[in-house]
Image (cartoon, helix red, strand yellow):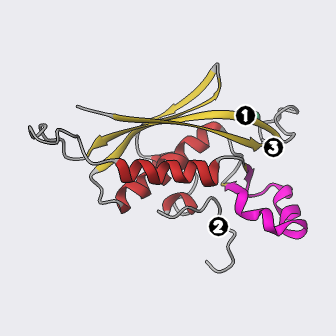
Amino acid sequence: MFELVFRRRFSMAHRLLAGGSAQCALPHGHTETVTVRLRAVRPAPLDGGANMVEPFARAKSRWHHWIDGHVDHALQLGEGDPLLGWFQAAEPERLPRILVTPGDPTTELLCGLFAAKLGAFLAADGGRLACAGLEIEETPTNTVRFEGDPFDILPRRQGWWSRADLSINDLDPAR
Ligand SMILES: [Zn+2]
């Protein structure tokens, strides 16, 4: 079975409060690479004409548009992080650039959130492709890889990750 593999780099900043690491509790950044693997939901033989698994230009461009325009250079904060309240009070214009997570924004959680978001994009695009796996390389020596249904591992079903829009948080009061 074919897999279509896309890779993208992005920079991010975060901090992790619950893990007890003094180093991770201060805001800091990484340059990460996210790799996604897509499969056709109903695999079929190549047709002898166009010979493509599925037209995937649209799915790919939407995913890369989201990563480049919304995830890249976002600040990732857990929804209980007091820094979030600080931004809401002092610099609300920055909120669209803050990616808010249910609990600490660990790479494990981000794999699940990204897989859910990609699944929402693919479903909105006709559901002909599905995410077979996703991995985030957080440093050259550490990679987290995820396969399966992200909703089996996420703390909550509903959130920006379950919607096929470009959002990275649920802070929009109009929602
Ligand atoms: Zn870190």
Q: Is residue 154 visible?
A: no
The numbered mark, 3 or 2, whose residue comes first in the sequence reads 3
What residue do we see at 84% from left, 42% from top? Answer: 27
Q: Is mark 1 within 8 Å of ligand 1?
A: yes
* Disc ID at residue 98: none
Q: What element carries label 1?
A: strand
The numbered mark, 1 or 2, whose residue comes first in the sequence reads 1
Foreground tag (1 vs 2): 1
What residue do we see at 41% from left, 52% from top? Answer: 119
Q: Mark 3 points at which residue?
A: 17
The numbered mark, 1 or 3, whose residue comes first in the sequence reads 3
Q: What element carries label 2?
A: loop
> Start and end of the magenta stretch?
75-100
Three-letter code for the amino acid on which mark 2 is drawn: Asp
Three-letter code for the amino acid on which mark 3 is drawn: Leu
Q: Mark 2 points at which residue?
A: 170
Three-letter code for the amino acid on which mark 1 is drawn: His
The x, y position of residue 79, in whole percent, is 73, 58
